[in-house]
Image (spheres, rainbow, N blue to C red):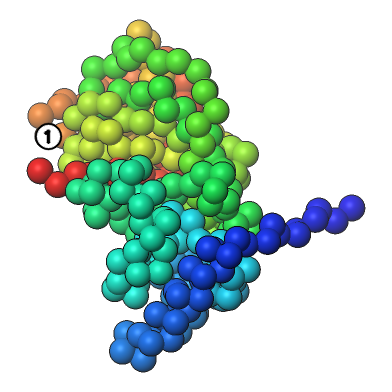
Amino acid sequence: MTKSTKKRPLTSEELLEAKKLNAIYKSKKKELNLNQLKVGDLMNISQGAVNHYFNGINALNYESAAQFAKILQVPVSDFSPRLAKKLELLLPKDIASNVDAKGSFLLWDNDSPLPEEDYVLIKYYKDVQLAAGDGSLEHSDFNDFKLAFPRSTLRQCGVSPSSAVCMTIKGDSMEPVLLDGTIVGINLDSKRIINNEIYAFRNSEEGLRVKQLSWNDDNTIKIHSFNPGRKDEIAYLEEMEIIGRVFTWFVIKSVL
């Protein structure tokens, strides 16, 4: 049985946004040396998806609008005052201006539906914190928060959408690589320890943690923190519960 792929009709406002965006692209593509294939590569989506945005088949959403604006070197308000206003309300101006348009994190809501052929929703355990410090963190269960990832990103990482979850890091022991507040993507299917990869795990009384792991010659495991002020630890595999390997991470930073 074939799943229906019928798309909802765009509103007149969304169609006008697509028309304005397409006009800006056509006026700037020569100056910026762009074509739809290049735009798709920069956005990590297909050329067909780019064409669908330009021609009013897919509605613009927060991330696509931010990406197009960055690539075309114009403010979002030039083609979508609606999304520009929502972004200002959703994120403080200093933070919104520093969201990496090539990141995997996607803002979305019911008014800006996801193009299902390009994105998948991943469970985000927002209140579950991985200790990048001393452990013993309080946490609660999944509360139906989700983050959207490009399907192509998960394919490149060899991660099944059903086996991916996101959690937040708390602490400074993994700085400067993983900052306090970083959101990490974890592959629950990848529990075999590969030297120098980063894993989420639980051991003894220290709760959920995230560290770089590697094998020692005596079959113990070295638990390494990137922060030079933290000492390495040694543990036995039997003392640990490997949650999964970290396959991606991202953080929104504000300007001081």
User: The residue under label 1 is which amino acid type?
Assistant: Pro
* Count of numbered badges drawn on the protein: 1
Residue receiving disc 1: 228
* Residue sitting at x 38%, y 20%: 208
Q: Is residue 206 visible?
A: no
Residue 110, given in percent of the width and then of the height, sits at 56, 44
Q: Nearer the viewer, residue 91 or 149?
A: 91
State the residue lying farthest toward the bottom.
30
**In the figure, residue 31 lies in which quadrant?**
bottom left
Is 85 left or right of 110, judged from the image as shown? Answer: left
The residue under the point 54% across, 40% down is 122
Q: Position of residue 43 (x, y in %)?
A: 44, 66
- Front position in the image: 13 or 35: 13
Q: Residue at x 51, y 36 (%)?
A: 146
Neighbours of disc 1 within 10 Å: few (<14), some (14-19), many (20+): few
- Horizontal placement of 191 versus 68: left or right? right
Quarter containing the C terminus: top left
Residue 156 % position (x, y): 51, 58
The residue at 31%/12% (across/down) is 136
Extreme residue toward the front, this view: 12
Q: Is residue 158 above or below residue 40?
A: above
Furthest residue toward right? 1
- Depth check: give the residue in front, 19 or 2: 19
Q: Quadrant of residue 68?
A: bottom left
Does residue 13 appear anywhere in the picture?
yes
Q: Secondary structure at mark 1?
A: loop
